[in-house]
Image (cartoon, rainbow, N blue to C red):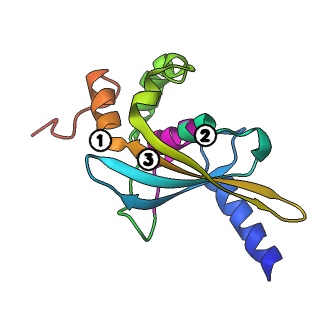
Amino acid sequence: MKKPILTLLFFLVLFSCHAQRELYSIECISVENEGFVKLKLLNYVKPTKFKIADASKDAIKALLYSGYSSTNCPTQKPLLKESADIDNFKKIESDFFLKNGKWKTFVRNSLDVDNIKTEKITIKEFEIMVNKDLLRKYLEEQKIIKSLNTGF
């Protein structure tokens, strides 16, 4: 019973992740106040070397490129919806995700929650709080995406 579930989970994650070398799944735990969303991130690749900073960056990337759906939260479409938005962000992405880059201003209270180890796979679980409203505002200020009220 566990093997089909793990296989299904693996393929679901494989097809839902945007990045080619990153293998993780993201799930919304709750929508918090002040624009924050609490996300659960499960990492499947080299979990022993995967740190909270890496998980935080992946949580932001998920909000930017893939969004999320969950039974606990309203569905969040990716912030970068159009190819022009993605191209605009790619111009600043390397600086944005530097060690002390701007990404840190959108994350708080990140926790390394659990390590799940089975015979064939190791999974590392994190809880990450990301201020998606502030991230959207930053992208609008940088002219990467259009504001929600554009055209009204």
Closer-to-camera residue (38/71): 38
Q: Which residue is situated farthest in the bottom direction here? A: 1
Instruction: Name the quarter where the C terminus is drawn.
Output: top left
The residue carrying mark 2 is 52
Q: Are marks 2 and 1 in contact (CB under 8 Å)?
A: no
Residue at image coords 71%, 40%: 50
Q: Which portion, as a residue range, is magenta?
A: 57-69
Closer-to-camera residue (50/152): 50
Q: Residue 57 appears in which quarter of the rendering?
A: top right
| SS label for mark 3 | strand
Hey, what amino acid is under mark 2?
Ile
| SS label for mark 2 | helix
Q: Which residue is situated farthest in the right direction here? A: 119
Residue at image coords 48%, 54%: 39
Q: Which disc number belongs to residue 133? A: 1
Q: Which residue is situated farthest in the left direction here? A: 152
- Give the CA distance from mark 2 to mark 1: 21 Å
In this view, 120 is above or below 20: below
Work out whether mark 2 precedes mark 1 in sequence or the reverse, and give the earlier one.
2
The residue carrying mark 3 is 129
The image shows residue 92 at horizontal and vertical percentages of 47, 18
- Give the CA distance from mark 3 to mark 1: 12 Å
- Give the CA distance from mark 3 to mark 2: 11 Å
Q: Residues within 10 Å of mark 2 (few under 14, many from 20)?
A: some
Main SS of the magenta segment?
helix
The image shows residue 104 at horizontal and vertical percentages of 46, 29
| SS label for mark 1 | helix
